[in-house]
């Protein structure tokens, strides 16, 4: 009797496992967003973000509300304490930004009122024939709220600082994209935050 009970238990156990596996296989699989963290941007062409490794991030125009491009200013001359300009390397990086953004739409360019930030997006403003819109870090919350609710600006480029761009990214994405500020020697972060009509948001922590 004991032996028969064991056999019966094993039989029901096997049937239960099989039923669980069949149920799991029959469930719709959720789409997993590829992780592009740390990959480098080659260029942005319309709604395709082309990466150096040959992959791309394709944005669906019909489902997008806003796209934010966030960078820290380019390399600054650390030998000058008050209002440091960009170094030759920083000027090259500013030109690279313009080249990356040349093939895509930009509705507004925002910068703090410092030489290093304004010079970083000066080339971009030139090729897009746009004015650089100033903002104050002290009123950053109000500025972001105004941009988010604007019906005029839907593709926004923002240049800031090592201690502000991470928090701006976190605020716009509604999640912790960065848990600390950028290192003082790190000028290569290129963050893209996409806000969809459905209310969902994607954040891409890229390099350039």
Image (tube, helix red, strand yellow):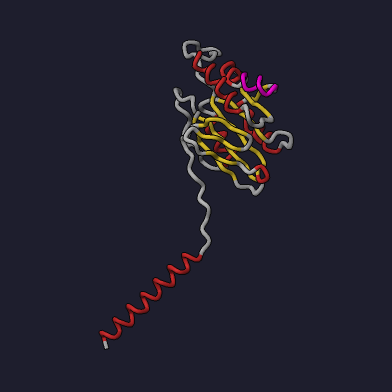
Q: Quadrant of residue 17?
A: bottom left
Up the image or down, 124 lies above or below 56; here it is: above
- Examine the residues drawn in magenta and state their main secondary structure: helix
167 versus 30 height, above or below: above
Residue pushed farthest top?
A: 80
Total count of labels:
0
Q: Residue at x 41, y 72 (%)?
A: 18
What is the x, y in percent for residue 197?
66, 46
118 to 33, vertically: above or below: above
- Which residue is the extreme one toward the bottom? 1
Decide if residue 85 is on the left or right side of residue 106.
left
Q: Whole-percent x and y of residue 104?
A: 64, 31
Give the residue furthest to the front. 54
The reply to whether residue 138 is in sight is no
Residue nearer the viewer, 125 or 70: 125
Residue under the image location 57 percent in, 26 percent down:
160
Against 117, is 176 above or below? below
Instruction: Give yes or no for residue 14 being in the magenta stretch.
Output: no
Residue 118, by quadrant, is: top right
Q: The N terminus is located in which quarter?
A: bottom left
Q: Position of residue 114 (x, y in %)?
A: 59, 18
Q: Is residue 189 visible?
A: yes
- Residue for point 70% across, 38% down: 149
* Residue in the foreground of this view, choosing between 166 and 55: 55
In terms of image quadrants, where is residue 156? Answer: top right
Segment colored magenta: 122-129
**Going by the image, does 124 lie left or right of 84?**
right
**Horizontal and vertical percent position of residue 58:** 58, 41
In the image as oriented, which residue stretches furthest toward the right? Answer: 152
């Amino acid at each position: 009797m004991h032996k028969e009970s064991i056999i019966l238990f094993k039989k029901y156990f096997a049937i239960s496992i099989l039923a669980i596996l069949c149920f799991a296989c029959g469930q719709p699989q959720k789409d997993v967003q590829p992780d592009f963290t740390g990959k480098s941007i080659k260029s942005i062409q319309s709604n395709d973000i082309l990466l150096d490794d040959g992959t791309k991030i394709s944005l669906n125009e019909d489902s997008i509300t806003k796209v934010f491009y966030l960078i820290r200013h380019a390399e600054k001359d650390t030998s000058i304490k008050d209002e440091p300009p960009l170094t030759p390397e920083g000027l090259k990086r500013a030109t690279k930004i313009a080249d990356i953004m040349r093939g895509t739409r930009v509705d507004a360019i925002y910068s703090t009122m410092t030489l290093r930030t304004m010079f970083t997006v000066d080339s971009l403003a030139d090729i897009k024939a746009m004015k650089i819109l100033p903002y104050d870090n002290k009123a950053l919350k109000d500025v972001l709220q105004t941009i988010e609710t604007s019906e005029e600006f839907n593709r926004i480029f923002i240049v800031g600082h090592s201690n502000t761009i991470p928090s701006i990214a976190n605020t716009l994405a509604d999640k912790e994209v960065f848990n600390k500020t950028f290192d003082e020697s790190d000028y290569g972060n290129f963050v893209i935050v996409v806000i969809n009509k459905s209310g969902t948001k994607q954040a891409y922590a890229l390099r350039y």
